[in-house]
Image (tube, rainbow, N blue to C red):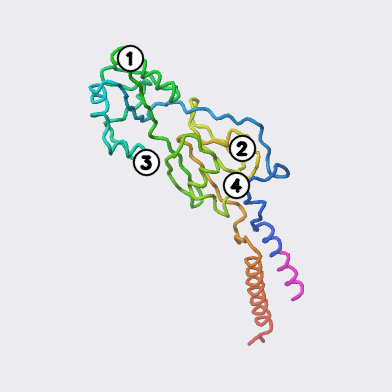
Amino acid sequence: MLKLFIRLSFYIISICFISSCVTSKTINYMQAPGFDIPAYKDSIKFTDYKLRVGDRIYVRIYSTDDKTNALFNAGGGSGMEQTMMASGGPISDLYTYVVEDDGCIVFPMIGDVHLVGQTIREATTSLEKAIEPLFKFSSVELRVLNRSFSVIGNGNSAYITMPQEKINIFKALALAGDIGIFDDRSKIKILRETEKGVQIKMFDVRSADIVHSEFYYIEPNDVIYIQPLNEQFFRISNLSGFVSTVVATFSFGVLIYDSAQRIGQTPSTN
């Protein structure tokens, strides 16, 4: 009976180990496609961000006319403002404009200027053309201020301002503190706002082919969702953890078996 119990215990522990163990195949990045690692088509194409309704943008006018600079830039821009721009810090609302529901910003002395759907370069050109009839020899600097993405999931939650225009998925995850060892790298989901509504895209970040796919670069307002692995019952990630689990389980089983034997051998009082 004891041998049968030990054998069954061994089988149960082995099954639990196989289903619960976290291996290098589960967590390593940049693995060659094959087996359960998908291959992605060479569809990588970084596209410049296009302004959307609700975007908050910073606009600065450069002109040879001091009066023009003073009018639009509050005296040509204070040293504090220039310092904040250089460091990526917050900027006063006095220097920002919101893209309204009609796709326009309301610019002083100019009125509505349509910018939605335009890249930063295109929007800059549109503003320069709009102010040209009133102020010749002027140039425009335009920046989007609300460029950010979010990461949510199994203990990984962060709201991160994008430090630059092009950020790939690996840098985004690094900024959020990377993926935990018990998180599922094969089913990363991105919620992305598009002109057709919110789309959900799922991909395997372990694949080296990710650098060729549409998932490689993230976009402003993306939400990256990281879900936990299913194999978390014992949370075994190394040999010492496995040994500890085996010893603890076997000791508990022997204790239960010994108690059952003692109960069975206790003489009846009747």
**Residue underneath mark 2:** 211
- Mark 2 to mark 4: distance in Å? 15 Å
Name which residue type carries label 3.
Ser
Q: Residue furthest front?
A: 64
Q: Which image quadrant: the N terminus?
A: bottom right
Q: Residue at x 36, y 18 (%)?
A: 128
> Identity of the amino acid at label 1?
Glu
Q: Are discs 1 and 4 less than 8 Å apart at CB?
A: no
Label 2, secondary structure: give it: helix
Q: Residue at x 40, y 19 (%)?
A: 125
Query: Looking at the rendered structure, which numbered label has been put on residue 185?
Result: 4
Foreground mark, 2 or 4, reads: 2
Left or right: 233 as drawn, with respect to 8: left
Q: Which sits in the foreground, 131 or 56? A: 131
Cα–Cα gap, marks 1 and 2: 43 Å
Which residue is at 57% across, 54% downward?
182
The residue identified by callout 1 is: 132
Mark 1–mark 4 Cα distance, whole angstroms, equals: 52 Å
Of 210 and 71, nearer the camera is: 71
Mark 3–mark 1 Cα distance, whole angstroms, equals 30 Å
